[in-house]
Every structure is written in structure tokens, then in C-alpha cells.
Image: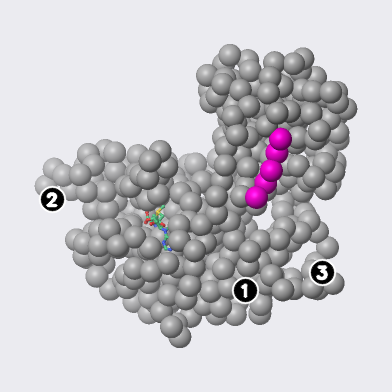
Amino acid sequence: MNVDTVSSESLRSAMVDQLAADHAAKGLTLRPEVEAALRTVPRELFTPGLPLEKAYENEAVLKKMRGDEAISSVSAPFLIAEMLGQAADALDGLAGRNALEIGSGGYNASLLRELVGSAGSVTTVDIDPEVTERAVACLAAAGYDDVTVVCADAEHPVLSGRSYDLIIVTVGSWDIPPAWRDQLTDGGVLVVPLRMFGITKSYALRRHGDRLVSVSHRQCGFVSVQGDGAHEVRYVDIAEGVHLRLDEGQQIDPAVLDGLLTTPREEAWAGLSLPPRTALIDLNLWLATHLTRETGTFVVLTAQKTAIDAGVVAPSWQFGTPATLRDSTLAYRSALRWTDRRFDLGAYAHGADAAAAAGRMVEHMRAWVDAGSPPPVLHVLPAHTPDGDLPDGAVLDKRHSRVVLTFTTEEKGTP
Ligand SMILES: C[S@@+](CC[C@H](N)C(=O)[O-])C[C@H]1O[C@@H](n2cnc3c(N)ncnc32)[C@H](O)[C@@H]1O
């Protein structure tokens, strides 16, 4: 064993130890077979040119930019580990499964190769020929030359007549094209980073005939899908370093936002006293559905650290905080308020109706906690499904699908 091999193994081992600890801190379990795969595949073979230590940092490695926007990367190990865990949990193990990965690079495909074993198969598809050429070379260098690599827009069926037990999408998506459902076996699982109400989460969805129902979800962030399924995200500046993130087609009147954050700030608090480890992961989608129903305009506020440090805004999360804009009033979820190692949930608002808007937002937070902090369950049905055939819940119409969000304290695998 030469010096490089030793340091590669020790760096990999330290990275996986950290991933296991991070899973535990989130209340998740790193499945033994996922852990074994992560301990086996040398990540540096998929990040050529990068110093060895960098290959084992728990971060995405950017591979390609278009202007300011990243369009291809080797995904962060924690995201890959969580998504493979979602897939393995949903399918009760991946051995012998046929898997399709959408968005290539080679690293995740090799982990999948380890997980499905010799009785299974792995196909990976990418829209970008530079990416597929690199993936082929890296996979060969790592000894995984039995992965099928295809260059195509995965919006459409990839290899005619083939179906998969697992489709794992490693690119941020706004919709679920029919091809993804149709290429799944019945009972098969789609793991996909899906954006709803401007909030992206990785969902594991099981196919039941013409519909998909979520069985788990995780926090995540990804580069956006390209090709026929591309969907625009717009940012509107509302102050120096503060933006509203809008989905394609979402319209707001920029005139009402001019100087709004310099007007007096009203606040409201839920009056809760929650312990530090309370999971808030599902509160934002609850707010998104309830505020959309109430105000019609749900938006996501993002802020640079400089704007937060300067006190311009104090959002719950710099990279995506639920907000509403009604007439000339903007309300958003505030940073937590800590007292004696417990915290409370609050809202800040600016504009004509600020005090009432902050109060209404806080009512929804209290209702979520009172309901037992339920997670969302997603039902994805074809776009032509009549209203009467939809489950009860908040309906989001996309290009190819009708997505219904329900909230229940138990995620279920059946419709
Ligand atoms: C985050 S990278 C994939 C990372 C990779 N799975 C790994 O092992 O690290 C996302 C990839 O999705 C690809 N992509 C974007 N839109 C696509 C589409 N419509 N069809 C196939 N690939 C697409 C991009 O070219 C990019 O290389």
C-alpha cells in the first residue's frame, strides 16, 4: 500500500464516520450497506485535478458553470448518502435491483453499482456529452465499466422498453415527467429533488399504477434540470442583499416592494417554548400551503449574510424563508427567539397591514405544532386527473402532473 492509498483510505474513513454522526444527529440511520459502499468507492477518482483532501470534504464539487449558475457538479456526499438511504429504505434494500440514475458524474453510479450487486444493473443518463464522456472515463478508472452511460434528455424515456425498480434523480426538478413514472415497475421508487412552492426537498415516491405517493423526504439543494423540463426561477431584489425567489409565471408588483423593508417592522410570536431538537423541517411547506390558500401569494425570501448582519432582515433561514406578499404588506418567518435553551417561532412584517399579517402567519405556525408537527405526504397524479379523483389536500398544478400535499403525522406508502 503506498502513501496515497493510505491517505485516501483514511480520509474516506473519516468522511464516512462524519456522515454516520451527521445522520445520527438528524435522527437518521446510515444503512450498513450504504456505509459500506461509501467506504469502498474512492471519490477522488471522480474529481480528477482536485487535491485529495478536497475530494473528501462533505461538499459538492462544481464541474461546470453557465454564467453565475452551476449546471453540473459531483454531488455532496451527505446528499448522496441520504438519497441512497431513502431509496434503500423504500425498497427494503437495493441488492438485485435495476437502477436508473438521472444526472451523471460517476460517483453516485459507482455507489449504486456496489449496492445493486452483480444481480442488479445501473444505467446513468446525462444531457451533457462532456459529463457522460467524463463519467465513462472515471467509471473505467475506478473499475466500474459495467455501468451503462447514456447521453440524452431524461425528460423522455431513456432506453426503450427498459423499466427500473429505482430511478434516482440527481438534478433539481420542478415537475415529474410521465417518462419517469412509466419507466418504473409498479411498486418501484422514484427519488427526486422536487421544488414545490419554491422549496426543494428530496422525496422518495412509490409508484401505484398511474400515481406516485411519497414515503420519505429530506432537505436538499441541487443544480436545476436542463432541456425540455427546464423551469425558470427568478429573483426580485427588494433591498441590498435581500431577494424574493419566484417560480416561473409568478407575478408580483415590484412597485409595492420599493423601500418596504425600511418601513417599521411589526412582529408576532407564537408563545411556544420548544426544546432545541424540535424538528422544523416540515413547517415551511405547511406555511406554504396555508398561506397560499389565505393570501394567494406565497414567496420565498433569501438574504445575504451582509443584509442579515446589517439588520435589514432577520429570516428563519438565509437560503429560503417562507414569506407572503398581500397588497403592500410583506410578512416572513423570523429567526427563532431563544430564551433559557428553549425557542419560540415568530414572524416579522412590513407594510400597511403588518401587525395583522405577522399575527396570521404565527397562527399557522401554532396550528402546525398543535397538529403534532405533521410532515407533508405528496401524491403525484397525471395532469388530466379530474378534481373528484384527487385526494383531499393542497393541489399544485404542474405541466405534467397534479401534485397534492396532505399533512399527516404518519407518512404512508399507500394511496
Ligand atoms: C448534480 S449533477 C449530477 C451528479 C452525479 N449524479 C454525481 O454522481 O455526483 C446534475 C447533472 O444533471 C444533468 N442534467 C440536467 N438536466 C438533465 C436532463 N434533462 N437530463 C439528463 N441530465 C440532466 C447535468 O448535466 C448535470 O451533470
Instruction: Tell me if mark 2 has few (under 14), some (14-19) or many (20+) residues whose alpha carbon lies within 10 angstroms of its own.
Output: few
Q: Mark 1 points at which residue?
A: 207
Residue at the spot 48% in from the left edge and 51% down from the top edge: 224
- Magenta segment's dominant SS is loop
Q: Which amino acid does label 1 sit on?
A: Arg
In which image quadrant can residue 132 be found?
Answer: bottom left
- Earlier-in-chain disc, 2 versus 1: 2
Q: Mark 1 and mark 2 in contact (Cβ < 8 Å)?
A: no
Q: Mark 3 and mark 2 in contact (Cβ < 8 Å)?
A: no
Q: Name the residue under label 3.
A: 387
Residue at the spot 29% in from the left edge and 51% down from the top edge: 43
Farthest residue in the left direction?
2
Q: Is label 1 or label 3 in front? A: 3
Residue 165 % position (x, y): 50, 75
Label 1 – label 3 distance at C-alpha: 20 Å
Instruction: Tell me if mark 3 has few (under 14), some (14-19) or many (20+) residues whose alpha carbon lies within 10 angstroms of its own.
Output: few
Q: Name the residue under label 2.
A: 1
Residue at the spot 86% in from the left edge and 33% down from the top edge: 360
Magenta segment range?
249-253
Q: Is label 2 or label 1 in front? A: 1
Residue 262 % position (x, y): 70, 15
Q: Is mark 3 on a helix, strand or loop?
A: helix
Residue 252 covered by magenta stretch: yes
